[in-house]
């Protein structure tokens, strides 16, 4: 922060022209200014358009289907009795 309490970010590592990708790193990602957004959708095909507007983050995205029980490809949180399968594209 600067002296007025404003967040300050320099794109230069040493303020002499050396570019940096350090950015502001945190443990929460916002989507359209919302944390953990959720949207109910119908079972049909959708086109996703994703723009990584982050200064210093790289993302790996996956679409999954939640399954009741432990029979899915990926286990859910401990004690949740859910698991996840990858969405298959056709």
Image (cartoon, rainbow, N blue to C red):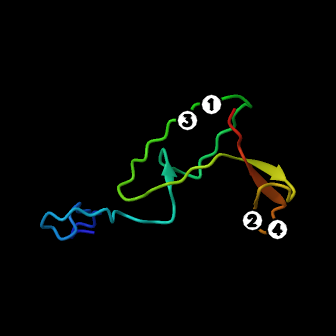
Residue topped by disc 4: 79
Q: Position of residue 44 (x, y in %)?
A: 71, 28
Mark 3 residue crowding within 10 angstroms, few (<14) / some (14–19) / many (20+): few
- Mark drawn on residue 46: 1
**Residue at numbered disc 2:** 77
x and y percentages locating residue 32 in the rendered image: 48, 44
Number of marks = 4
Query: In the image, residue 43 lies at what x, y percent?
Result: 74, 31
Marks 1 and 3 sit apart, C-alpha to C-alpha, by 6 Å
Which residue is tagged 3?
Answer: 48
Residue most extreme to the front: 90
Say which of marks 3 and 2 sits in front: 3
Q: Position of residue 87 (x, y in %)?
A: 71, 43
In three-dimensional space, the C-alpha distance between marks 4 and 2, rounded to whole angstroms, equals 6 Å
Query: Circle 4 — which element?
Result: loop
Q: Is residue 82 left or right of residue 6?
A: right
Q: Which numbered mark, 4 or 1, is in the foreground of this view?
A: 1
First in sequence: mark 4 vs mark 1: 1
Residue depicted at x 78% and y 69%: 78
Residue that appears at 49% across and 41% down: 50
Rendered image quadrant of residue 16: bottom left
Q: Are marks 2 and 1 in contact (CB under 8 Å)?
A: no
């Amino acid at each position: 922060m600067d002296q007025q309490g404003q967040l300050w970010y320099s794109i230069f590592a040493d303020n002499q022209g050396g570019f940096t990708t350090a950015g502001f790193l945190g443990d929460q990602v916002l989507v359209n200014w919302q944390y953990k957004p959720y949207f109910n959708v119908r079972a049909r095909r959708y086109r996703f358009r994703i723009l990584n507007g982050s200064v210093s983050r790289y993302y790996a995205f996956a679409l999954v289907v939640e399954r009741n029980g432990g029979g899915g490809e990926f286990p859910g949180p401990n004690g949740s009795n859910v698991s996840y399968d990858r969405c298959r594209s056709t």
